Image (cartoon, rainbow, N blue to C red):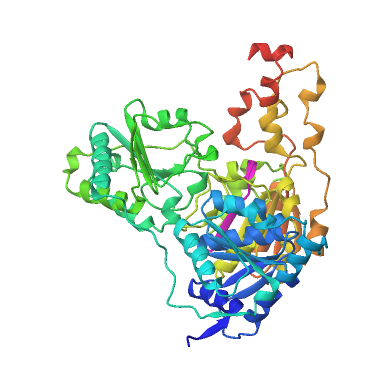
Amino acid sequence: MSETVTIASYLKTRLEQLGLGAMFGVAGNYTAGFLDTILADPDSSIRISTNANEICAGYAADAYARYNGIGALYVTYSVGAFSLLNTIAGSYVEQVPVLLINGGPTSKEASLEQNAGLLYSHTTGLASVDIGMFRSITAAAEQISNSAQAPYQIDSALTAMITELRPAYIEIAEDLWRAECQAPQGELFADRPGSVTRSEVDAAVEATVELIQGSSKALFWAGIELARYRLQDDFLELLETVNGRHTSHNDQIRFITTALSKSVISEDNPYFDGCVTLKKAEIDTLLGDDGILIGIGGWTVGKDTGNENIRSNRAVLSYQGGILVGAKYYPSVLLEDFLKGLIEKLKSIPAQNLAALRVTSKAPRLPLTLESNSSEKLGYDAFFGALDSWITRDHMLVVDAGFPLIGAQSLKIRERGGFLAQAAWLAIGYSVAAGTGVKMANPDKRVVVVVGDGAFHETCQAISDHTADGQNTVVFVLSNGIYGIEQFIVNPNPFREPDDKKDYPDQNLNTVFKYNTLPKWDFVKLAEGFGAKGRKAADHAGLHEVLGEIASDPGGNYLVEIVIPKTDLPGALDSDAKGVGEDEYQNPSWPPCKKF
């Protein structure tokens, strides 16, 4: 007879084999059997981390998985799982392998609910409602109600998760955790087949090289999939291949990143030329009329391209499962195969036949504007200028959506993977809770979070998670009292310089809309309530003092309010403020709009 184990032990073993070291969640009786099994094993590699709420747990697990390889979180049926739709959707969109473990009602409870009309706690009365919600935003979703089938369902879900690098969902009835099943056989691995045909890879490579040789300029875009598929070293080899034979600094083909892929390659790399937003105008500035953009693992998501379609006859966009070379499309080509094929092909071409371009991105290098004795008020650029000189290789920077992400793009990140932002899904509040997971996966680093006050309201409880886990995280809340990015999108008039500001008859259009105004919080007292050290800086001198204190206290957990004027903007948005907001555009009856 083959060896048997409990279903809880089976899942625990599989997660340990895949390298899981931390699991996040909110405890509930439906998952207690699984959690107790982990606690009962003093040799288990899995640390159970409890979180303030499910959303904090979801973001923490997502961030942890980006560095560890996989993440996992546990919740109880419906009331816990429903809260995670947003976090799991973000993991799905950004290709992060997170396992959602949901405890479900017992078989008896499910039967009584359906047949006798008895509504149990945390249930809606609808059969399979939880798994039904998650099927469309996971690589695999399994509802386990039979112990004999459990090993196959668990293995199937986990294999899909690590193969597709997307979340998976496993729901296990409460009374099955301690039921017996067959013990794990062997180990799981990503079942990622090669490209369909070698000829398809060769054709994509040939088309790319032909485009390069037909142009006088070329620029690489290092995309997020270099990190997802661990291809950074291959990309560095590509850079060395095309540049190793050049003798002039002005004859180098260089690379840029975008918000989603910032720091996939260390920004100390000599070929790095900035983190930019690849709008068509920016591409024209970088490459002129005859240059080409070669994207390696880049996604054309809104934040990275300014919501513009950048496909053209002078762009190569390669990603897992397909290569676009101008108007030609090569399906079912793995990114790794394409990248390696491109390297080999370029090695065979004489250096003088390769296009070359020394590009300088428009992303500004922020000068240090901080003066220790200055009472000048802080703004976004002043803060990020100071942060640029303060952060080191020992820091991991996590930045939230909105103005903080825009302002942070020009920071220099010297460590590979030293920057994290959820720049595709763009859920506000991600950063504070994600900081928990980043620290768990990088215990030797100090995590620095930069978040707007509106986003901070979403997940402020994560500060207590940092404290509970003994973390030395620093959270900077950029406090301007409004949902700045939302106001800017619909009506940027309040942010415009005096000479550019419109004088609308409707005075509501000349000020920040009331619905974008935030309730005022005392962040210092809030920090103390969560067990952190609360500080506040409103001018250069105050920021200088706070940064010095944090640097001299490497073990401290800090929440720092950075007071920003209500209508200050990151410098990168100055020109955009002159454009027409969505609310302005949609209301042409307002006289000034006719002049835009």
Question: Toward which corner of the image does residue 552 lie, by quadrant?
Answer: bottom right
Residue 198 in view, yes or no: yes
Residue 385 versus residue 143 in the image, above or below: above
Q: Is residue 257 left or right of residue 120?
A: left
Would you say 218 lies left or right of 151 here? left
The percent position of residue 495, horizontal first and vertical second, equals: 69, 30
Front position in the image: 83 or 425: 83
Q: Given the current orientation, which residue lies at the most extreme front position? A: 115
In the rendered image, residue 201, in percent from the top left (x then y), is placed at 27, 47
Q: Is residue 363 left or right of residue 193?
A: right
Identity of the residue drawn at 77% across and 42% down: 481
**How many labels sit on residues?**
0
Magenta segment range? 394-404
At a point 77% along the width and 36% down the height, the residue shown is: 516
Q: Quadrant of the C terminus?
A: top right
Whether residue 545 appears in this view of the structure is: no
Q: Is residue 402 magenta?
A: yes
Camera-side residue of 65 and 173: 173
Tell me: residue 365, above or below residue 536.
above
- Image location of residue 85, percent across then percent down: 66, 52
The image quadrant that residue 509 belongs to is top right
Q: Nearer the viewer, residue 584 or 578?
A: 584
Query: Residue farthest to the bottom?
Result: 1
Residue 560 in the image: state x and y as whole percent: 72, 55
Residue 513 lies in the magenta-colored region: no
- Residue, x 67% and y 57% (percent of image)? 128
